[in-house]
Amino acid sequence: MEKQDIVKLTKDILASPKPGLYFLYGEEEFLKHRFLLDFKNAVIPADLADLNCSTLSGPDQAERLLELAYTLPQFCDSRMVVWYNSGYPLMQQRYKKKADEVMEKLKDFPYLYLFIYSTPDEFGGTSRDERDALNKMKGTALNFELLSPARIKKWIVRHFEAEGIKASEDDALYLTQRLGTGMTELSSAVSKLCAYVTEKGRDEVSRADIEELIPVKVSFSAFFISDNIRKRDPSALCAYVADAKSRAEKPQTVLSQIIAEAEKLCRIKLAQKSGAPYQLAAKQLGINEYVVKLAYGAVSDVPEKRFFRFLHACHEADRAVKSTSGDNWEIINQLICSI
């Protein structure tokens, strides 16, 4: 699939919006939200948005979507619906059949703008099944990838200028090195820096200001937990737990992620032991093929009983978290150290 220039593509769409299905996915949530807002402003008058814009959430909303679609626009020419948490197009079969039927009915509605909003956790666009689904989709699929540092630095400079503060492109690039290229976090950092230098009576941000106010972000990939359980790296996992704690994430959520990855590795180990090639195992287990390929290499030299011993420790930790009033984070750290 040809790589999209999402900024140019969305500008072209907004210049001449057409009814139909738009599937939004990718990591850059800031651009996704911006595109939705700009699209709504382009097709529906602001004073009529409450009458003609609707949102849905959950995979079981296909019937409700159909009802909304058959509701004619009121006092304007357009109706807009945004469907969150749908799981589409890779839904469970009990939801997918109905959703596919509804999509087929909606494809030619001349006034309907339907947006399916997918988070990175729902749809990554990288697995074979996901790529096949994109190719079959009867609509416009838009991949909102994170922008490169080279592109995002110019946006950062403009963001500072909008607040009356000067910043060099080199310092803007340095900000991405500390924080990454996620525009939501960068926007917050720019606002913080603007407030700081304004309070100091200055109109320009410096490298020293960035170092003082913006801590280096600890980044974790989508497969961080799985990768480091496979590597048996407790220090990396403890860093993940510390970051989750600092963000006030619930310890039960982190523990459930660890348990899910431990169970996944046990299933992969059994598949490998059976002699199944990783491609077949990925299909049978419903797991990303690349993840299974990596795991096959990692689990080959590790005894089966070691995986199941860790899984048992996970369930013991889960029981302790649910039945005691102690320090749940400490329970998780003790589990990690047993890996």
Image (cartoon, rainbow, N blue to C red):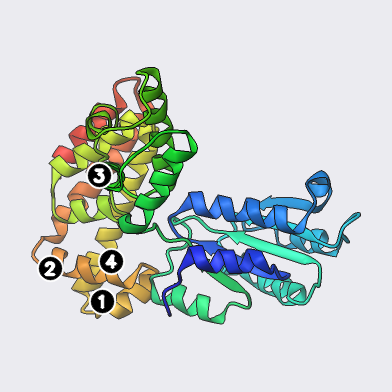
> What's the CA distance linking mark 2 and mark 3?
41 Å
Residue type marked 2: Ser
Residue under label 4: 291
Residue type marked 1: Tyr
Marks 2 and 4: which is nearer the front?
A: 4
Q: Secondary structure at mark 4?
A: helix
Residue type marked 4: Val
Q: Return the residue found at the far right.
A: 75
Residue under label 2: 300
Give the left or right position of residue 130, taking residue 224 as reference.
right
Characterize the local packing of mark 1: few (<14), some (14-19) or many (20 or more) Cα atoms within 10 angstroms: many
Disc 4 + disc 1, Cβ < 8 Å: no
Closer to the camera in the image, 65 or 334: 65
Q: Is residue 53 visible?
A: yes
Residue 280: x %, y % from top left: 32, 80
> What's the CA distance linking mark 4 and mark 1?
9 Å
Residue 87: x %, y % from top left: 55, 61
Marks 2 and 3: which is nearer the front?
A: 3
Q: Which comes before the other along the chain, label 4 or label 1? A: 1
Residue at 48% across / 65% down in the picture? 6
> What's the CA distance linking mark 3 and mark 1?
41 Å
Residue at 54% across / 69% down in the picture? 9
Residue under label 1: 278
